[in-house]
Image: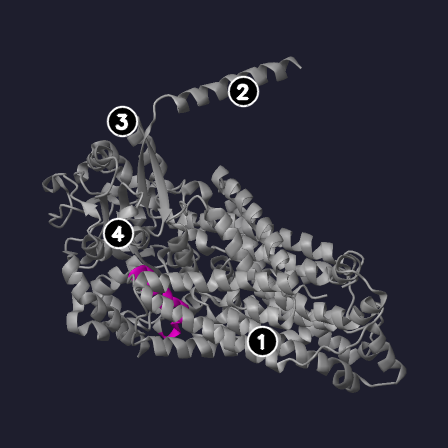
């Protein structure tokens, strides 16, 4: 009886406290549109929210779903202040929409393996496409892309469809960058090894962890997850001397934002050491502005390619159809 | 007795919810666009795999349904429920289960290897068919089983009294039922397989297995070509409607006559040969359908301990959405349980979810924040998509009830309300329970439109499975998938069982 009374009193007090704070300062809200995985409890979203709210005196709200299709549909009426999680394959389309404003950050200080001078789309982390394998199953991984083409048929790969997934598209562009006119022949050589093509990365990686295929198209950073989160050092990325395709994730400020200063301070926050330290293990990617010595230990141990291949958005737009067609034709032979 | 105005409203709602969003997408695109080069090939593959999947599923379902209809054994009710499970699994979970059995590292190939036999691969066009049969054999079996159970016991007793042999029973009693039910089951499965996407891609092994739905996805999400996406969606809709109309034209009238709901032992099924055939049919179906499920369960068990609060909250939301969808779907289905109504309900399964979701987003956006409506919209869309199944289950029996008891009710001068409460609903109890179970389970497992616009606090369980996978947490994802499987089956069982209380189906 007594316990109930105390409980009720506490609950009432707590209720009033909530009401009071709601009625008090009209908190400013920063709405961030993000890719679905970002804001899930297991993505970087909750930590980003915590760190940014500690410094902004505002409420950061993630809104997830289809990123660019949604903002293109909404146009200038969008509620978004910041868009977080774009890839280079859509930046051209995003730029043409005129919905985004310059980020105002110094890109000179970025630690990317490629030059980045874009004043609208700001990178926060990166990685490279790579074929990932389990050292206990594959004892002699192919040492180059050429060696992968020549690999015996019993080495199996799972990849993603370039028409439905960003990593699949990056692979098509990777093959295009390495082999050019010879890309279709390269795909034809690979077709014996390709077990199947999945819609997205998750399905492929699931097949790989189930032991269904020897290698999976993933990222150079994937081994860091297994090393840090699972204390497992048997997952490695095969590094090819021909080079690896660069994949970067970007954020941008929305031009029609009603809280421009907040959006600006979010852009600055992304470049802060605090954010950059967090994003490595938060998003399992390499921080875009952090020297290698300061990466988490598991990341420093990663084997990374010396040659980095990258098409800027204009080149990528130009090569894309041919790269996908080479994939289709080569695998249909 | 047919409530025409209600039927018109229900049918109009289906049309409004399917055609208006597609029109909205077309309007937003500024008009239709042309098809792309690969679309013709995608169309051919789509039609081919849908036709083969439907034919194989129905052909295999006939002996299984027949065996289940004429055998009684302990655990039969549980088996019937479990056999329904593949149909309601989320695609990604089912594919992983299939691969655990038929994949390169699956138990089948390990067994073959142990015996020194060459392995088999599941990847390729046959893998697509295998997966579609896995998904749809349960549906085909249940639909045909309903047909068998609807044969009045008096018919069989009469056949026994006339001394008809097993083949004569087939010809006189069973074949007329099959000729009515099987083409309809095939048509429903054909339509389901028309919009196949992830299955065809994952097991199809590459670009040869491109479907129309994949082309829609590509146009929508990667090329922002709304015009082409809407055109492809219209094409898919037209194909499905054509298939549905063809099936309806094929199916003859019910005409089994009324019975007194007595079960009679099947005099034609007592011989050793018949017992053997039935045992094989049930056994093979159980092994084929339940082994992948068991492996999903086994793989998921370890991940159960990894699950945190967000997964359980999402599970709660999914159950709520599923129950809302079920209520809505049944309310929608009852006035439409007629021949015309079934045609009116067809677009629900045939419209591309991606185009539908985008269209609803465009329509809702000027007035409300679509994100706030994510869960109610998901419930409505899930009800819409389950509607054709509910109608397929309800319509034959509803028509039979009307044909068999309509005149009597008219002679007795029953009012519409009395007819509904005393005759119509009680006699539809079994199909209503089945339809409700199916709708609830389908809604549980469907990723649906929520993926297009959901904020983190509104995620459903299937979405959480994908999110866990995207964060490398494969083991937890399998645990969440097991929870999803258990909840889907649980809902299905509760409703289906409720419909069969006091009935010995």
Instruction: State how far apart marks 3 and 1 are (Cα).
Output: 61 Å
Where does the image place residue B493, in percent across and percent down from the top left? Answer: 67, 54
| Side of A108 where A249 appears, left or right | right
Residue with the mark numbered 1: B186
Q: Is residue A45 above or below residue A197?
A: above
**Chain of the residue under the numbered disc 3 shown in the image:** A
* The one of A63 and B333 positioned closer to us in this rendering: B333
Q: Are marks 2 and 4 in contact (CB under 8 Å)?
A: no
Both labels 2 and 4 in a single chain: yes
**Do dots 4 and 1 share one subunit?**
no
Same-chain status of marks 4 and 3: yes
Q: Identify the residue shown where x is 41% and y is 51%.
A: B364
- Residue B455 — which label? none
Give the main secondary structure, helix, strand or loop, of the magenta stretch: helix
- Which residue position is annotated with label 4? A220
Which numbered circle lies on residue A55?
3
Q: CA distance from mark 2 to mark 1?
A: 59 Å
Instruction: Give the quadrant of the C terminus of chain B.
Output: bottom right
Residue A244 position in % (x across, y down): 20, 57
Q: Quadrant of residue B204?
A: bottom left
In the visual, does A201 lie left or right of A106? Answer: right
In whole angstroms, how far apart are the C-alphas of marks 4 and 1? 47 Å
- Do callouts 3 and 2 mark residues in contact (Cβ within 8 Å)? no
What is the span of residues highlighted in magenta in the rendered image?
B208-222
Decide if residue B112 is in sight here.
Answer: no
The residue indicated by pointer 2 is A11
Label 2 or label 1, whichever lies nearer to me, is 2
Could you say where residue B89 lies in the image, as x and y percent from the top left? 54, 58
Q: Are marks 2 and 1 on the same chain?
A: no
């Amino acid at each position: 009886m007594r316990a109930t009374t105390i409980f009720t009193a506490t609950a009432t007090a707590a209720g009033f406290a909530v009401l009071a704070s709601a009625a008090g300062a009209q908190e400013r809200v920063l709405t961030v549109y993000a890719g679905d995985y970002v804001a899930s409890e297991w993505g970087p979203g909750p930590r980003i929210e915590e760190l940014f709210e500690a410094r902004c005196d505002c409420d950061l709200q993630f809104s997830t779903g289809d990123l660019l299709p949604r903002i293109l549909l909404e146009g200038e009426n969008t509620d978004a202040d910041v868009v977080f999680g774009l890839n280079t394959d859509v930046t051209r389309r995003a730029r043409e929409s005129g919905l985004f404003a310059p980020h105002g950050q110094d890109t000179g200080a970025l630690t990317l393996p490629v030059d980045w001078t874009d004043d609208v789309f700001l990178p926060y982390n990166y990685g490279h496409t790579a074929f990932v394998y389990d050292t206990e199953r594959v004892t002699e991984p192919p040492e180059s892309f050429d060696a992968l083409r020549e690999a015996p048929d019993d080495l199996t790969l799972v990849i993603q469809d370039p028409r439905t997934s960003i990593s699949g598209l990056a692979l098509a562009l990777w093959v295009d960058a390495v082999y050019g006119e010879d890309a279709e022949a390269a795909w034809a050589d690979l077709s014996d090894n390709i077990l199947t093509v999945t819609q997205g990365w998750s399905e492929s990686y699931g097949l790989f962890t189930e032991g269904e295929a020897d290698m999976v198209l993933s990222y150079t950073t994937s081994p860091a997850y297994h090393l840090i989160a699972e204390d497992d050092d048997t997952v490695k990325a095969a590094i090819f001397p021909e080079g690896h395709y660069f994949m970067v994730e970007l954020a941008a400020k929305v031009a029609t934002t009603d809280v421009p200063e907040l959006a600006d301070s979010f852009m600055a926050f992304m470049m802060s050491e605090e954010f950059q330290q967090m994003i490595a293990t938060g998003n399992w990617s390499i921080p875009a502005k952090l020297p290698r010595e300061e990466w988490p230990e598991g990341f420093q141990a990663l084997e990374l390619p010396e040659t980095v291949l990258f098409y800027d958005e204009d080149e990528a737009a130009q090569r894309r159809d041919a790269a996908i067609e080479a994939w289709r034709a080569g695998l249909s032979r | 007795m047919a409530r025409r105005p209600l039927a018109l409203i229900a049918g109009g709602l289906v049309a409004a919810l399917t055609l208006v969003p597609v029109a909205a997408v077309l309007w937003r695109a500024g008009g239709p666009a042309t098809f792309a080069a690969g679309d013709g090939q995608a169309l051919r593959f789509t039609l081919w795999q849908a036709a083969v999947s439907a034919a194989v599923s129905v052909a295999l379902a006939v002996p299984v349904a027949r065996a289940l209809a004429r055998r009684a054994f302990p655990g039969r009710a549980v088996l019937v429920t479990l056999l329904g499970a593949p149909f309601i699994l989320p695609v990604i979970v089912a594919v992983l289960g299939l691969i655990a059995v038929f994949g390169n590292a699956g138990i089948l190939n390990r067994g073959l290897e142990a015996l020194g036999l060459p392995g088999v691969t599941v990847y390729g066009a046959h893998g697509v068919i295998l997966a579609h049969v896995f998904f749809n054999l349960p549906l085909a079996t249940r639909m045909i089983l309903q047909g068998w159970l609807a044969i009045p016991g008096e018919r069989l007793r009469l056949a026994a009294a006339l001394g008809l042999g097993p083949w004569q029973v087939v010809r006189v009693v069973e074949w007329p039922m099959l000729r009515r039910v099987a083409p309809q089951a095939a048509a429903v499965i054909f339509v389901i397989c028309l919009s196949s996407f992830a299955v065809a891609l994952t097991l199809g092994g590459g670009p040869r297995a491109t479907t129309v739905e994949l082309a829609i996805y590509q146009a929508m999400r990667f090329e922002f070509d709304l015009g082409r996406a809407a055109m492809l969606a219209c094409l898919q809709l037209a194909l499905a409607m054509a298939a549905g109309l063809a099936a309806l034209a094929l199916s003859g009238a019910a005409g089994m006559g009324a019975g007194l709901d007595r079960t009679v032992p099947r005099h034609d099924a007592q011989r050793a040969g018949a017992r053997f055939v039935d045992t094989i049919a049930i056994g093979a179906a159980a092994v084929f359908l339940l082994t992948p499920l068991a492996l999903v369960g086994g793989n998921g068990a370890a991940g159960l301990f990894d699950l945190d609060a967000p997964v359980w909250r999402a599970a709660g939301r999914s159950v709520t959405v599923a129950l809302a969808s079920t209520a809505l779907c049944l309310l929608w289905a009852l006035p439409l349980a007629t021949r015309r109504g079934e045609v009116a309900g067809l677009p629900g399964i045939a419209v591309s979810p991606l185009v539908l979701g985008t269209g609803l987003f465009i329509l809702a956006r000027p007035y409300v924040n679509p994100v706030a409506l994510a869960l109610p919209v998901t419930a409505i869309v899930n009800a819409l998509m389950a509607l054709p199944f509910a109608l397929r289950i309800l319509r034959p029996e509803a028509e039979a009830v009307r044909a068999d008891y309509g005149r009597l009710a008219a002679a007795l001068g029953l009012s519409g309300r009395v007819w509904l409460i005393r005759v119509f609903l009680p006699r539809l109890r079994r199909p209503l329970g089945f339809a409700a179970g199916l709708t609830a389970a389908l809604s549980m497992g469907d990723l649906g439109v929520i993926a297009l616009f959901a904020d983190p606090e509104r995620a459903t369980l299937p979405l959480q499975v994908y999110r866990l996978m995207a964060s490398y947490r494969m083991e937890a994802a399998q645990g969440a998938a097991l929870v999803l499987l258990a909840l889907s089956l649980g809902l299905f069982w509760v409703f289906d069982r409720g419909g069969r209380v006091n009935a010995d189906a």
